[in-house]
Amino acid sequence: MQIPIQNVFYLLAYAWDQLEEAEALQVDCTAFDNAFALLAKVLANGTTHLLKRGLDRNYQEEETLTSQLRGKILFPASVKENTFARAAAYCAFDELSYDVLHNRLLKATFKRLAKEETLCPKIRQELHLILQRFPPEITPITVRPAVFRKIQLHRNNRQYKLLLSICELVWLRLLSTEQEGVHPFKDFLRDKKQMAYLFEKFLLNFYKRHLNREEWQVSAKQLSWQLTPVEDPSHSAYIPSMQTDISLISRHRHLVMDAKYYPKALKGQYDRDKIITNNLYQVFSYTQNITNAGGKQIEGILIYPEVSNSLSLSYKFTTGNNALIKICTVNLNQEWQDIESDLLKIV
């Protein structure tokens, strides 16, 4: 599926819920022919702005031998080395420092990308020059995916969120292709699991952003199977959870949207295109297990990304809760304004 690079960037910005921050960097997406180079450039521009404003600092405990007492005196170490005889002592005190985890990850990413042979020399040179501007006190770090879960951002350093999201994605791809000279993003758009997650998060945040919050509730909602144990109530524990990708609830409608990232929305069967059976079963299960709709029109929507053909099918169950079922596509190979318009028309 050949999605234009600029649209991939929008998908990422929405999925990370960082659209304004991404647009503020004013990167010409059309100047790049691959996602890796584009993300490196966005990272470079964003970090340049960050360095101009000043990197985030936090208090870090330091221990040092000093003749000017400050903070807490470390008596065991001072007595052991008899520092008092030299009118000095080991002390522990809090000092404002740039050596915090989010700065370490940024610096480590720049250091790695500046040596990445699959990036063009111009971008690598720009990354190298920015790297020289990081304070030397920021210590090296071994980057693993779990490290990103330890980052603590707040209102005063929220400008790091987009940059660290890029860093995390870059490292996930780099660590999965550690052979030198292998392009880490060559198969990014072919990674079905990665792109399925990206498409789902994009849709969720898109509707959160564009639907009127006073009229719509947008969330990933958990439903309960309408199954009651026949013999033992404890058997309920064996029933799996039912997590919707996106639930859209208004005064009169209860929509359940299931995002599917497949090469094709339909599957050939006996020389005829058919809706993918398992997908239809899944969205049907969602609609039939909504019990708290309160008279709202229940609708299940299967939505697929496309780059050429369009599809819009609608069906109605004539039994049960009279739910509507829609199967539709959104063309990601068009101007972004048209993509926005098409997505809003679906609901």
Image (cartoon, grey):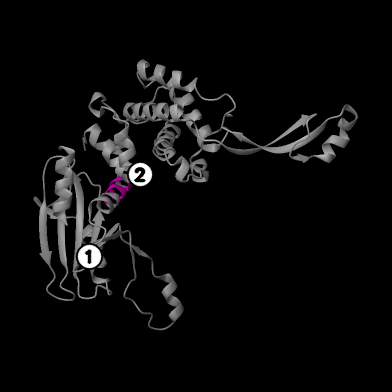
Label number found at residue 48: none
Q: The magenta stretch spans which residues?
A: 197-203
Q: Is residue 266 visible?
A: no
On the image, the x and y values in percent for residue 174 come to: 43, 31
**Image quadrant occupied by the N terminus:** top left
Label number found at residue 16: 2
Q: For the residues marked 2 and 1, what is the alpha-carbon distance in whole angstroms?
A: 25 Å
Taking 40 as reference, is 9 above or below it? below
Foreground residue, 317 or 82? 82
208 vs 84, left or right, is left
Front label number (2 vs 1): 1
* Residue furthest out toward the left: 272
69 vs 294, left or right, is right
* Type of amino acid under label 1: Ser
On the image, the x and y values in percent for residue 244 come to: 30, 60
Secondary structure under badge 1?
loop
Q: Is residue 15 visible?
A: yes
Taking 229 as reference, is 275 above or below it? above
**Image quadrant occupied by the C terminus:** bottom left
* Residue furthest out toward the bottom: 231
Quadrant in the rendering for residue 96: top right
* Type of amino acid under label 2: Trp
**Alpha-carbon neighbours of circle 1 within 10 Å: few (<14), some, or many (≥20)?**
some
Foreground residue, 228 or 197? 197
336 vs 234, left or right, is left
* Residue furthest out toward the right: 85
> Dot 1 corresponds to which residue?
250
**Alpha-carbon neighbours of circle 2 within 10 Å: few (<14), some, or many (≥20)?**
some
